[in-house]
Protein backbone atom coordinates (compact mmCIF):
# COMPACT_ATOMS: atom_id res chain seq x y z
CA UNK A 1 0.00 0.00 0.00
CA UNK A 2 1.40 3.41 -1.01
CA UNK A 3 0.74 6.79 0.54
CA UNK A 4 1.21 10.26 -0.86
CA UNK A 5 2.15 13.10 1.45
CA UNK A 6 2.00 16.65 0.14
CA UNK A 7 4.83 18.69 1.63
CA UNK A 8 4.63 22.40 2.45
CA UNK A 9 6.73 23.21 -0.62
CA UNK A 10 4.16 21.51 -2.83
CA UNK A 11 6.19 18.42 -3.64
CA UNK A 12 4.72 14.95 -3.17
CA UNK A 13 6.37 12.23 -1.11
CA UNK A 14 5.39 8.73 -2.31
CA UNK A 15 6.17 5.83 -0.03
CA UNK A 16 4.97 2.50 1.28
CA UNK A 17 3.21 2.52 4.65
CA UNK A 18 6.27 1.33 6.61
CA UNK A 19 8.55 3.79 4.79
CA UNK A 20 6.17 6.68 5.53
CA UNK A 21 6.28 5.93 9.23
CA UNK A 22 10.07 6.29 9.11
CA UNK A 23 10.24 9.24 6.68
CA UNK A 24 7.60 11.51 8.19
CA UNK A 25 9.64 12.52 11.27
CA UNK A 26 12.70 13.19 9.09
CA UNK A 27 10.71 15.20 6.55
CA UNK A 28 9.07 17.22 9.32
CA UNK A 29 12.39 17.88 10.99
CA UNK A 30 13.89 19.15 7.74
CA UNK A 31 10.83 21.26 6.94
CA UNK A 32 10.74 22.82 10.39
CA UNK A 33 14.47 23.48 10.50
CA UNK A 34 14.41 25.82 7.49
CA UNK A 35 17.05 23.81 5.68
CA UNK A 36 16.93 23.58 1.91
CA UNK A 37 18.95 21.11 -0.11
CA UNK A 38 22.73 21.14 0.11
CA UNK A 39 22.92 22.79 3.53
CA UNK A 40 21.25 26.01 2.37
CA UNK A 41 18.92 27.57 4.92
CA UNK A 42 15.71 29.26 3.90
CA UNK A 43 15.15 31.20 7.12
CA UNK A 44 17.31 34.33 7.38
CA UNK A 45 16.75 34.81 11.11
CA UNK A 46 17.93 31.26 11.75
CA UNK A 47 20.95 31.95 9.54
CA UNK A 48 21.81 35.08 11.54
CA UNK A 49 21.59 33.11 14.79
CA UNK A 50 23.83 30.37 13.41
CA UNK A 51 26.30 32.93 12.06
CA UNK A 52 26.51 34.64 15.48
CA UNK A 53 27.00 31.35 17.30
CA UNK A 54 29.70 30.15 14.90
CA UNK A 55 31.32 33.53 14.12
CA UNK A 56 30.70 33.09 10.40
CA UNK A 57 29.56 35.28 7.54
CA UNK A 58 26.31 34.77 5.64
CA UNK A 59 26.08 34.18 1.90
CA UNK A 60 22.58 35.10 0.77
CA UNK A 61 21.58 33.95 -2.71
CA UNK A 62 18.55 35.20 -4.62
CA UNK A 63 17.54 32.74 -7.30
CA UNK A 64 14.80 31.77 -9.71
CA UNK A 65 15.38 28.04 -9.62
CA UNK A 66 12.97 27.06 -12.39
CA UNK A 67 13.29 29.95 -14.85
CA UNK A 68 16.58 31.86 -14.42
CA UNK A 69 19.27 30.22 -16.58
CA UNK A 70 22.20 32.09 -14.93
CA UNK A 71 20.81 31.02 -11.51
CA UNK A 72 20.69 27.39 -12.60
CA UNK A 73 24.21 27.66 -14.04
CA UNK A 74 25.57 29.22 -10.86
CA UNK A 75 23.98 26.58 -8.68
CA UNK A 76 25.28 23.74 -10.83
CA UNK A 77 28.76 25.06 -11.59
CA UNK A 78 29.66 26.90 -8.38
CA UNK A 79 27.37 26.14 -5.46
CA UNK A 80 27.21 22.40 -6.10
CA UNK A 81 30.96 22.09 -6.71
CA UNK A 82 33.02 20.12 -4.20
CA UNK A 83 35.41 23.03 -3.62
CA UNK A 84 32.60 25.46 -2.75
CA UNK A 85 30.70 22.98 -0.57
CA UNK A 86 33.84 22.08 1.34
CA UNK A 87 34.73 25.73 1.90
CA UNK A 88 31.20 26.82 2.80
CA UNK A 89 30.75 24.00 5.30
CA UNK A 90 33.35 25.51 7.63
CA UNK A 91 33.22 29.19 6.74
CA UNK A 92 29.74 30.33 5.73
CA UNK A 93 26.10 30.18 6.65
CA UNK A 94 24.22 29.75 3.37
CA UNK A 95 20.76 31.21 2.74
CA UNK A 96 18.72 30.76 -0.42
CA UNK A 97 15.79 33.01 -1.25
CA UNK A 98 14.18 31.27 -4.20
CA UNK A 99 11.57 32.88 -6.44
CA UNK A 100 10.34 30.04 -8.66
CA UNK A 101 7.58 30.62 -11.17
CA UNK A 102 5.86 27.30 -10.46
CA UNK A 103 2.92 27.77 -8.16
CA UNK A 104 3.29 25.91 -4.88
CA UNK A 105 7.03 25.34 -5.43
CA UNK A 106 7.55 27.03 -2.06
CA UNK A 107 5.11 27.52 0.78
CA UNK A 108 3.19 30.77 1.25
CA UNK A 109 5.15 31.34 4.45
CA UNK A 110 8.43 30.94 2.57
CA UNK A 111 7.26 33.32 -0.16
CA UNK A 112 6.66 35.96 2.55
CA UNK A 113 10.12 35.37 4.07
CA UNK A 114 11.76 35.62 0.64
CA UNK A 115 9.84 38.78 -0.25
CA UNK A 116 10.92 40.39 3.03
CA UNK A 117 14.55 39.58 2.20
CA UNK A 118 14.13 40.99 -1.30
CA UNK A 119 12.69 44.21 0.15
CA UNK A 120 15.83 44.56 2.25
CA UNK A 121 18.58 43.30 -0.06
CA UNK A 122 17.29 42.94 -3.63
CA UNK A 123 14.94 45.85 -4.32
CA UNK A 124 15.82 45.82 -8.03
CA UNK A 125 14.95 42.13 -8.43
CA UNK A 126 18.29 40.96 -9.85
CA UNK A 127 18.78 37.24 -10.45
CA UNK A 128 21.02 35.65 -9.52
CA UNK A 129 22.24 37.95 -6.80
CA UNK A 130 24.63 36.67 -4.15
CA UNK A 131 25.48 38.80 -1.14
CA UNK A 132 28.22 38.15 1.40
CA UNK A 133 27.35 39.83 4.69
CA UNK A 134 28.01 39.89 8.40
CA UNK A 135 25.62 38.28 10.86
CA UNK A 136 24.09 41.74 11.37
CA UNK A 137 23.36 42.19 7.66
CA UNK A 138 26.25 44.51 6.76
CA UNK A 139 27.01 43.86 3.09
CA UNK A 140 30.65 43.07 2.35
CA UNK A 141 30.38 42.05 -1.32
CA UNK A 142 27.70 41.48 -3.98
CA UNK A 143 27.83 39.37 -7.11
CA UNK A 144 25.22 40.28 -9.73
CA UNK A 145 24.65 37.51 -12.22
CA UNK A 146 26.72 34.37 -12.45
CA UNK A 147 30.37 35.21 -11.77
CA UNK A 148 32.75 34.58 -14.63
CA UNK A 149 34.91 32.45 -12.35
CA UNK A 150 35.64 28.82 -11.61
CA UNK A 151 34.46 27.46 -8.27
CA UNK A 152 38.03 27.68 -7.01
CA UNK A 153 38.30 31.32 -8.08
CA UNK A 154 34.98 32.11 -6.41
CA UNK A 155 36.17 30.44 -3.19
CA UNK A 156 39.40 32.46 -3.45
CA UNK A 157 37.36 35.69 -3.65
CA UNK A 158 35.38 34.65 -0.59
CA UNK A 159 38.53 33.75 1.32
CA UNK A 160 40.14 37.14 0.66
CA UNK A 161 37.02 38.98 1.81
CA UNK A 162 36.59 36.82 4.92
CA UNK A 163 40.26 37.11 5.87
CA UNK A 164 40.09 40.88 5.40
CA UNK A 165 37.02 41.08 7.64
CA UNK A 166 38.63 39.40 10.66
Image (tube, helix red, strand yellow):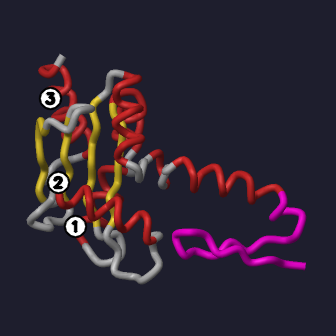
Q: Earlier in the sequence, mark 3 or mark 2?
A: 2
Q: Do the residues under discs 1 and 3 have CB atoms within 8 angstroms?
A: no
Kindly give the residue lying farthest to the top in the view shown: 166
Q: Do the residues under discs 3 and 2 have CB atoms within 8 angstroms?
A: no
At x 57% / y 52%, what residue is drawn?
32
| Apparent side of residue 120 relative to residue 85 in the rendered image (left or right) | left
In this rendering, the answer to whether 71 lies above or below 83 is below
Stretch in magenta = 1-21
| Apparent side of residue 117 relative to residue 47 in the rendered image (left or right) | left
Q: Closer to the camera: disc 2 or disc 1?
A: 2
Q: Quadrant of the C terminus?
A: top left
Q: Which residue is mark 1?
A: 70
At x 21% / y 28%, what residue is drawn?
159
Residue 142 seen in this snapshot? yes
Q: Closer to the camera: disc 1 or disc 3?
A: 3
Mark identifier at residue 153: none
Give the crowd class for mark 2: few <14, some 14-19, many >=20 residues within 10 Å.
few
Q: Which residue is mark 2?
A: 120
SS at mark 3? Answer: helix
In this rendering, the answer to whether 48 lies above or below 54 is below
Give the crowd class for mark 1: few <14, some 14-19, many >=20 residues within 10 Å.
some
SS at mark 2? Answer: helix
Residue 146 seen in this snapshot? no
Q: Do the residues under discs 2 and 1 have CB atoms within 8 angstroms?
A: no
User: Magenta stretch: residue 33 in it?
Assistant: no
Q: Which residue is mark 3?
A: 161
In this rendering, the answer to whether 60 lies above or below 103 is above
Hey, which quadrant is residue 68 in on the image? bottom left
Q: Earlier in the sequence, mark 2 or mark 1?
A: 1
At x 85% / y 71%, what residue is drawn?
16
Amino acid sequence: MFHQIKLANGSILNCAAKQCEMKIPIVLLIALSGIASGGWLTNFEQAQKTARENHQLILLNFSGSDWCLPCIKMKKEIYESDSFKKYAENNLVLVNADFPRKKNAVSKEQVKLNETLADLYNKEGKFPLSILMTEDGKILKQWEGCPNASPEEFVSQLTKIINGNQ
